[in-house]
Amino acid sequence: MNKTIQTISDVAFRDITTFGGAIFYTILVVSLFLFHQQKLAFILLAGFIITLFITVIIRLLYFRPRPVKQEFHNIIERIDASSFPSLHTSRAIFLAGIGISYSPSFLFSLFCMLSAALIIYSRIHLKKHDGIDVLGGIVVGLGTLWGVMYGMQC
């Protein structure tokens, strides 16, 4: 692949992957609170906390190095250096599921699914995760989505 095209691709996917990150998620939750959408904000906050908690527990118990290995010198760095499951993927799947659940629009649902797919692919493209890591993230995201949606019905 041409080096210029590779560079453009890396920059594009680096930007796409931020939509599965903590900063974007935090801005979204705060915005929902500011626009008086407290119920939805609390649902997203719950999903954020649950996916983070599950991912940290798994990474504490099972270390799987990232495709491009990261050095670590303490427990926090070790958690970050572990790639399984993909936290960005978990958040993207949870957020897409909530978006689909709360929107009657087919186009918005399609946008949610495509956004999640791009975030997931970006993690592999950027060599932060491999297939099994994102599959684990999908399972965590869907499990969290099911748990939060089921918990709201009780």
Image: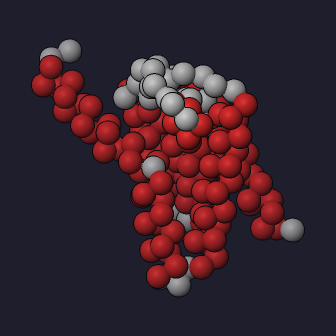
- The one of 40 and 79 positioned closer to us in this rendering: 79
- Quadrant location of the C terminus? bottom right
Name the residue: 65% across, 42% down. Answer: 56
**Image height of 67 relative to 115, above or below:** above
Name the residue: 52% across, 47% down. Answer: 92
Residue 31 falls in image quadrant:
bottom left
Q: Is residue 44 left or right of residue 128?
A: right
Name the residue: 43% across, 66% down. Answer: 27
- Quadrant location of the N terminus? top left
Residue 151 falls in image quadrant:
bottom right
Return the x and y of residue 44 as percentages of the image width and height: 60, 63
Return the x and y of residue 142 as percentages of the image width and height: 68, 45
Return the x and y of residue 94 as percentages of the image width and height: 60, 51
Is residue 138 visible from the viewing direction of this image?
A: no
**Image height of 61 relative to 105, above or below:** above
Q: How many marks?
A: 0
In the image as oriented, which residue stretches furthest toward the front?
73
Return the x and y of residue 9 as percentages of the image width and height: 24, 31
**Image height of 49 relative to 122, above or below:** below
- The one of 98 and 108 positioned closer to us in this rendering: 98
Q: Is residue 57 left or right of residue 99?
A: right
Is residue 12 visible from the viewing direction of this image?
A: yes
In the image as oriented, which residue stretches furthest toward the right?
154
Q: Is residue 52 left or right of residue 5?
A: right
In the image as oriented, which residue stretches furthest toward the bottom?
36
Name the residue: 73% across, 31% down. Answer: 61
Q: How is the image coloured?
A: secondary structure
